[in-house]
Amino acid sequence: MNNLRNLRGTIDLLPEQLIKWQNVEKILLEQLSRASIKEIRTPLLEMTELFIRGIGEGTDVVSKEMYTFIDRGERSCTLRPEGTASVARALIQNGISSNPLQKLWYMGPMFRYERPQAGRQRQFHQLGVEFIGYESVRSDLDIIALAWDILGKLGIKELNLEINTLGDVNDRLNFQKSFLKWLENNKNSLDLDSQKRIHKNPLRILDSKNIQTKKVLENAPRLFDFLSEKSHERYSCLKRQLETLKIPFVENYNLVRGLDYYTHTAFEITSGALGSQATVCGGGRYDNLIKQMGGPNTPAIGFAIGLERLILLAGKDLEVVRNTDIYIINQGLIAESLAMNLSRKLRNYNLIVELDLSGASFSKQFKKANKLKSKSIIVIGDEEAANKEFLIRLFDRSGNENQEEIISFENDIKLEKWINNYLLAK
Ligand code: ATP
Ligand code: MG
């Protein structure tokens, strides 16, 4: 038994760590609901086929990183490595044409078989946002601003927005022809991984991390030079509007998504505070995905934020926990049952109430209340129980007693007054 451990690349989130997670999630949820974006939840497990078609065979995710297995019904299943394909499937399956414009978010675990390191796990979490049915430059701008503001709201420093455009399908076909020719001519100067991609997923070579390849690529044809006038105008418009909104950005011609259904805007937000796994948010437009998956022609744009990296970046102020409001110290048969009832009543006042269940000595229970920095304590012993009353004592910030009252169990009015006057007063 004692050799049982979690799988590599997965982690337990313990109560102390979850304080920050919950605070971050609360801010995220507030921001999303203020922007009128609705939640969608899809299964963690899907047909493998979905990701092969929805992400593409030539990608790292599909070719090397998926958790795929055959289930007892001999179906090939995969733990989702990302959310967009599932969202697209769910929308198509549930009748997208009756609701062609939707702003959606999802949050939850994703699975990728990668080499674990700081900010990179095999089970990790993403918040994703997808604007379905939106085609205009304004929707690109809105979604970039949303990602930017979410990160800003969490107090994340040293943010950099990188943008690029991939043009439309035609632009890319034109580019690909000349890029392929160039790749074949320069094959031997590329790293092995990139060489393998030439016929599988040539665009992906553009964001190779290999230094030698990067250098050689400086002389390659640029997608940018193959953009139609219309695509150029769209991209210029996005840049102008980002400037108007005072969202700083840099252009990165090598920011690509490897697949045919990605179009026009691609963006990434990195933070200088993150070290090597610097990307917190990746997003882009995917006007051809839903059609390619068998749905109606539906433009869309989205992004995903990695929550582990977000938690690493978010400030210490989000690690603060709300202290216990009332700690109920109790001992003796009747006292214990009165204490139980009182704790249930007090929780209706939106107070954090901890009922001591230890049956330990009063002094041990006092110590525990102290350790938790409880704002107040209630004491119920045999004597209090016999008199049908309890003692409630408030502490000031430095832990000194500064108010004390005896309240009868029947006197709800007095109890409420105490709560309003002292406990809920900031
Ligand atoms: P990377 O280049 O870091 O592998 P990616 O391009 O694979 O990122 P996306 O698929 O765009 O990432 O996912 C969006 C975000 O999800 C990333 O920017 C990152 O914050 C987070 N993310 C992706 N993979 C992992 C992982 N294995 N562990 C933790 N977070 C991850
Ligand atoms: Mg990756």
Image (cartoon, rainbow, N blue to C red):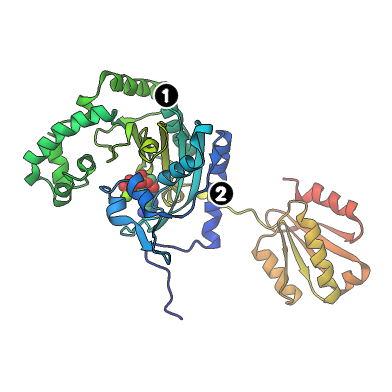
How many numbered marks, from 0 up? Answer: 2
Helix, strand, or loop for circle 2?
A: helix
Residue 64's spot in the image, x, y percent?
28, 56
Name the residue beneath numbered marker 2.
23
Q: Residue at x 36, y 20 (%)?
A: 237
Up the image or down, 158 lies above or below 115; here it is above
Alpha-carbon neighbours of circle 1 within 10 Å: few (<14), some, or many (≥20)?
few
Q: Residue at x 56, y 52 (%)?
A: 22
The amino acid type, in three-letter code, at marker 2 is Asn
Q: Nearer the viewer, residue 86 or 39?
A: 86
Name the residue beneath numbered marker 1.
136
Q: Nearer the viewer, residue 176 or 73?
A: 73
Up the image or down, 14 lies above or below 382; here it is above
Helix, strand, or loop for circle 1?
A: loop
Up the image or down, 327 lies above or below 279; here it is below
Q: CA distance from mark 1 to mark 2?
A: 34 Å
The nearer-to-camera label among 1 and 2 is 1
Residue 233's spot in the image, x, y percent?
31, 19
Confirm whether residue 277 shows in the render.
no
Confirm whether residue 308 shows in the render.
yes
